[in-house]
Amino acid sequence: MMRLTRRCLFITKISKISRPPASGYEIAELPNEKVFMEFLKYYNTKCVLAVLHSGSLRSTAGEGGAGTKIVEDPLTRSFISSINAMNMGNPNETKLALVPGPHAPRMVEEYGVLTYPTVLLFMNGKCVERVVGARTREVSIKALFTLRNAGRNIFSRE
């Protein structure tokens, strides 16, 4: 038997669906695995998503900026832009880090990275999930479940 749902009830249910934050997520572009380990220690209580990519990084210090940029990795660039459109949980609880795979050989071997990009989800300093390839929906679902299982707030604050 089918039930008739009033239009106003349907609209209120649709409006309660969680959305990604309006400003997006902060993404730290890290030069190597040593800096990533320090980043992981600093954000030990947060959910850290480490995106290992094949692109090399170049310094932008000579161009008026202090930092690095992805040179030529269109897959990583499109993957990162699509991550900003997905819900990865509360931005105060989720931190993203870009780590170049060629400059992180120990991480590549320890976590069995076969292809780039690979996303490693860390909670309390330990790797709890791994997503191989540019799969934004899978990353989103695993990040939300990781936060929920740790008893954290998964809802975005806008």
Image: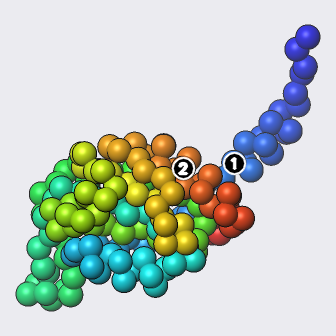
Counting from the top left corner in percent of width and height, residue 32 is at 22, 74
Picture disc at residue 155? none
User: What is the residue that sits farthest to the top in this orientation?
Assistant: 1
Q: In the rendered image, which residue does mark 1 sit on?
A: 17
Q: Is residue 110 above or below residue 28?
A: above
Choose the circle earlier in sequence order: 1 or 2.
1
Q: Which residue is at the front of the view, 144 or 22?
A: 144
Crowding around mark 2 (Cα neighbors within 10 Å: few <14, some 14 to 19, many 20+) is some
Counting from the top left corner in percent of width and height, residue 44 is at 51, 78
User: What is the residue that sits farthest to the left in this orientation?
Assistant: 62
Q: In this view, does 41 lie above or below 13?
A: below
Q: Which residue is depicted at the point 21% across and 87% down?
A: 66
Give the CA separation, mark 1 to mark 2: 18 Å
Under mark 2, the amino acid is Lys
Q: Which residue is depicted at the point 88% across and 14% down?
A: 2
Q: Which residue is at the front of the view, 109 or 7?
A: 109
The quadrant of the image that shows the C terminus is: bottom right
Task: Identify the secondary structure beneath mark 2.
Answer: helix
Counting from the top left corner in percent of width and height, residue 25 is at 46, 67
Q: Which residue is depicted at the point 56% across and 47% down?
A: 141
Q: Which residue is depicted at the point 41% across and 47% down?
A: 131
Tag nearer the camera, 1 or 2: 2
**Quadrant housing residue 26:** bottom left
Is residue 91 visible to the viewer in this orientation of the structure? no
Picture disc at residue 142? 2
